[in-house]
Image (tube, coloured by chain):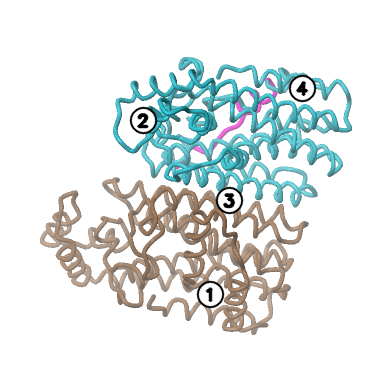
Chain colours: A brown, B cyan
Amino acid sequence: MTSTDQLREIIREAFQKETFPYVPFELYEPIRYTISQGGKRLRPLLVLLGCDLFGGDLNKALSPAIAMEIFHNFTLLHDDIMDQAPIRRGKETVYKKWNPNIAILSGDTMLVLAYDYLSKSDAALLPELFSLFNRTGRQVCEGQQYDMNFESQETVSESDYLEMIRLKTAVLLGCSVQTGAILAHAPREEAEKIYRFGENLGLAFQLQDDLLDSFGDPEKFGKEIGGDILCNKKTFLYIKAFELAGPAELKVLNHYFSSQKHDPQEKIREITAIYWKLNVQEYSNDLISQYFDKALECIGKIDAEHTSKSELKLFANNLLRRDH
Amino acid sequence: MTSTDQLREIIREAFQKETFPYVPFELYEPIRYTISQGGKRLRPLLVLLGCDLFGGDLNKALSPAIAMEIFHNFTLLHDDIMDQAPIRRGKETVYKKWNPNIAILSGDTMLVLAYDYLSKSDAALLPELFSLFNRTGRQVCEGQQYDMNFESQETVSESDYLEMIRLKTAVLLGCSVQTGAILAHAPREEAEKIYRFGENLGLAFQLQDDLLDSFGDPEKFGKEIGGDILCNKKTFLYIKAFELAGPAELKVLNHYFSSQKHDPQEKIREITAIYWKLNVQEYSNDLISQYFDKALECIGKIDAEHTSKSELKLFANNLLRRDH
């Protein structure tokens, strides 16, 4: 068993050693820019955790771990164009720093690179790994499509929203940790249990991300606070607020969540005030706890060494106490 | 041995049987729209030709053949955003009919789908197939990047241009036909020879495409005639014209190939007149013949049945006598 901190160090070193091509510069420089920013490296960490839990060889999990991170970053490059997000991880997004065409093409290259890194796995495991990764890739695109649809859709139910974040975020966490389990030759049933752990953790993680988007500390969060509010994203907070609002609050919500132009800071201030008043964070935190408990339950059912399972629980716990 | 016409029919049927998901509609409808338009199906045909040449099982080549076509169409969706091309195959491009975000995300999904179809090959062949496909995917992105760079680059040499079209177009033709050979368990050396055939054919094909872009029949070509001229694309014709131009022609070329605004029809008319005057088509046709001869030479060196090789030559011949 390897501690999460040790795994983190292994990943840090792996990315440091990794070199990407230099030519054409316009194509690969944005990739280096994106990958070198770091971030939480959550997905590669999950690959290693999944592999370690079943006693696999961590060296063989490094390329697939890098694959998951590059895939994730490919989605960010393209999502940031679609969402017109100027800032990510405290820095300018690729489409903003360069232009949308560069972000499209560097993103495409990253998707190919992700497959290239995943291909460097044991040949005998490729059919299973690709089957999982291909399905996940499609689901992530579907999730992003729903997210875009919701922007112009009049009503979005809580379950619509949860299905959207499951596709857009949670399945890749499930895929990452299951990839690790597959690499460790875990029995199929166990590998699927750990997928469910990752998926539930992912749902909790995304709900928390939405909370941080409205209530986080801008210094630590790395993105604009209130970004979701400004672009009328139908997050859990938004949906819950409409559900709980009395006539007075509804008037404010309808006023600011319309296509009309508003002063951005005023809009964020007024909507956040409503969120506080209706206590929507509390509801969100309850749901986060539910998914978190489900994730822990999945770990409980896995047939693996007790200390490794504890390490995984500790990791999940720390993840959900984050402030960025 | 199967005739090219029979292979074409097999591909037509395969695409007719293929169903893509329906939900979310906004994501998959543009994919169906694109794939159902047909086009030449050149890449899947090359997969089957490569497979048949080495006596492989054509049924096992159908999924990889579809993979190449979907990959090619993914690049079209994204390239058309970058090039702001309104028309393709006589119909509105996806970014124009829907919007750029839809074209980005449907394109991404198509890239994942391409990998999914390729994954449905014999498990033992996956490492070799993916290695070739991943390299090709990256090269195609690199080619598109060079193509974009050339738009703002003051001088582009003939060899720069040829390397760009090798990456952007020719390698995927090589990859397609080599994929077929790999599926037929052809010896590595033979599979690489047939790659060179595809690559040289691809270079001839793209040079011819550029000719059709300036001199083709708009009804048959399916794209706007003069599109390359309008966006100052540094094609072989452009490069050759500057090389051959005397002072009078240089004045016209410099005038119209500047960042200034011009009447589109006037620009196309004046530049095409210069091309005629300098006889650049003749130079282009010579180069096409050279690459075509190289392609035929590659076939000559391949250790395969004589009649199958003749069929491949016939196919190449017909391709280069096309008017669309």
**Marks 4/1 same chain:** no
**Distance of label 4 from label 2 (alpha carbons):** 41 Å
Q: Which residue is mark 4?
A: B313
Q: Point out residue A139 in the picture as x, y percentages from the top left corner.
A: 51, 51
Circle nearer the N terminus (4, 2): 2
| Secondary structure of residue under mark 1 | helix
Disc 3 residue crowd, few under 14, some 14–19, many 20+, Cα 10 Å: some
Instruction: Tell me which corner region of the image, top left, top right, bottom left or bottom right, holds residue B39.
Output: top right
Q: Point out residue B214 in the picture as x, y percentages from the top left corner.
A: 48, 23
**Distance of label 2 from label 3 (alpha carbons):** 49 Å
Q: Are marks 4 and 1 in contact (CB under 8 Å)?
A: no
Instruction: From this view, report whether residue B40 is shown above or below residue A130.
Output: above
Q: Are marks 2 and 1 in contact (CB under 8 Å)?
A: no
Q: Point out residue B190 in the picture as x, y percentages from the top left corner.
A: 84, 38
Image point (44%, 69%), residue name: A205
Pinpoint the chain carrying mark 2: B
Picture disc at residue A135? 3
Identify which residue, A151 or A69, lies in the foreground: A69
Of the residues tagged 2 and 1, which is closer to the observer? 2
| Secondary structure of residue under mark 3 | helix
Picture disc at residue B307? none
Q: Amino acid at mark 2?
A: Tyr
Q: Amino acid at mark 3?
A: Arg
On the picture, is A156 further left or further right than B140?
left
On the picture, is B167 further left or further right than A139?
right
Placement of the N terminus of chain B among the 4 image quadrants: top right
Is B17 colored magenta in this rendering? yes
Image point (72%, 73%), residue name: A56
Identify which residue, A105 or A144, lies in the foreground: A105
Q: Which residues are magenta?
A: B9-24
Placement of the C terminus of chain B among the 4 image quadrants: top right
Pinpoint the chain carrying mark 4: B
